[in-house]
Image: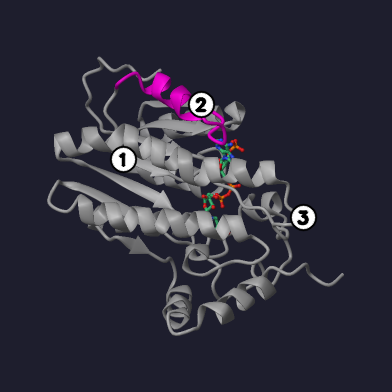
Amino acid sequence: MVDASRTPTRPLALVTGASSGIGSELARVAARDGYDLLLVARRRDRLEALADELSRDHGVDTRVATADLATPNGVEEVERALDGAPVEVLVNNAGFGGRGRFAVERPLADDLAMVQLNVASLVHLTGVVLPGMVERRSGGILNVASTAGYAPGPLQAVYYATKAFVKSFSEALTEECRGTGVRVTALCPGPVDTEFASVAGIEGTSLMRAPLIKVSAEKVAESGWRALRRGRAVVVPGIPLRLAMQSLRLTPRRVAARIAERSQAAPRS
Ligand SMILES: NC(=O)c1ccc[n+]([C@@H]2O[C@H](COP(=O)([O-])OP(=O)(O)OC[C@H]3O[C@@H](n4cnc5c(N)ncnc54)[C@H](OP(=O)(O)O)[C@@H]3O)[C@@H](O)[C@H]2O)c1
């Protein structure tokens, strides 16, 4: 539990999905910049190892909370851990994807859990912390979307749709929060080598093998954190990927959908 009565010498950042990949790197960047942390995910051992590292290397106060945010009660666990402590930065990063044709290959329960994690819990946590930020006229929310949010994604239909939601929701909040002292940024990475591809079942696909548009988790985190500090609504990390997203604007949606499908087709063995 974060001590709500503590005299806050450092602002608090809450990072979901901090046990791996982009979330771990975002927690490292926040600690380096002097934030105390509440790290959230399901794997406690990973969170505790990261908390020890951040406290040791940066002298910040780091707590962990285990919560399954793919269930409707997950956010309540996080609220219990917060115990009313004000959050200065919320990083909504936890998320997963899953490959397969929606009608015949995807277990419906898995896709509904994905919507709960990638969308509903993200909205829920935002709803828990944003009113306090607006009242204090200070704070920031970094929502990890994806370039998947720019086009329909056959073979990951639900995942791409969740990321389109996150991007749209974030951009709308950016406008609503203008003049309140609160910033909202959508971070839209392309392929990044983390545990994401194996969880989603897209390892070895041409999407995950595209060297030009690949960016490391460290660089993605730096890019997202910098964009939040600068108050940018959307950031796509890496120049080649930004150019690719620009050209997608001129591409008909049906063509974009076919490109997305081909890029996620099972690799030939
Ligand atoms: N890697 C990519 O190519 C890529 C590209 C674009 C966007 N993204 C987005 O980046 C974000 C981070 O992904 P990543 O690449 O860093 O993948 P990752 O290494 O698989 O990390 C995912 C994180 O989410 C947490 N998580 C998963 N299910 C959860 C649940 N039910 N409840 C709470 N936490 C949960 C995981 O922790 P536990 O398993 O310990 O719970 C882990 O910390 C995701 O939103 C993803 O959609 C990734």
**Vertical arrangement, residue 243 with respect to residue 2, above or below:** below
Q: Which amino acid type is shown beneath numbered disc 3?
A: Glu
- Quick one: label 1 or label 2, which is nearer the N terminus? 2
Q: Which residue is mark 2?
A: 73
Magenta stretch holds residue 83:
yes
Q: Are marks 1 and 3 in contact (CB under 8 Å)?
A: no
Q: Are marks 1 and 2 in contact (CB under 8 Å)?
A: no
Circle 1: element type: strand
Q: Which residue is mark 3?
A: 105
The residue positioned 47% from the left and 41% from the top of the image is 120
Q: Which residue is mark 1?
A: 89
Quadrant assignment for the C terminus: bottom right
For marks 1 and 2, give the CA distance: 22 Å
Image x and y of residue 2, in percent: 36, 20
Q: Can residue 217 be seen from the camera position used here?
A: no
Image x and y of residue 62, in percent: 41, 27
**Vertical arrangement, residue 247 with respect to residue 224, above or below:** below
Circle 3: element type: loop
Q: Which residues are magenta?
A: 67-84
- Quick one: label 2 or label 3, which is nearer the N terminus? 2
Q: Are marks 2 and 3 in contact (CB under 8 Å)?
A: no
The residue positioned 29% from the left and 56% from the top of the image is 172
Q: Nearer the viewer, mark 1 or mark 2?
A: 2
Question: Callout 3 environment at 10 Å: few (<14), some (14 to 19), or many (20+)?
Answer: few
Circle 2: element type: loop
For marks 2 and 3, give the CA distance: 27 Å
Some atom of ligand 1 lies within 8 Å of the CB belonging to the residue at label 3? no
Question: Callout 2 environment at 10 Å: few (<14), some (14 to 19), or many (20+)?
Answer: few
Q: Can residue 90 be seen from the camera position used here?
A: yes
In this picture, residue 116 sits left or right of residue 30: right
Image x and y of residue 262, in percent: 69, 75
Q: Which amino acid type is shown beneath numbered disc 2?
A: Asn
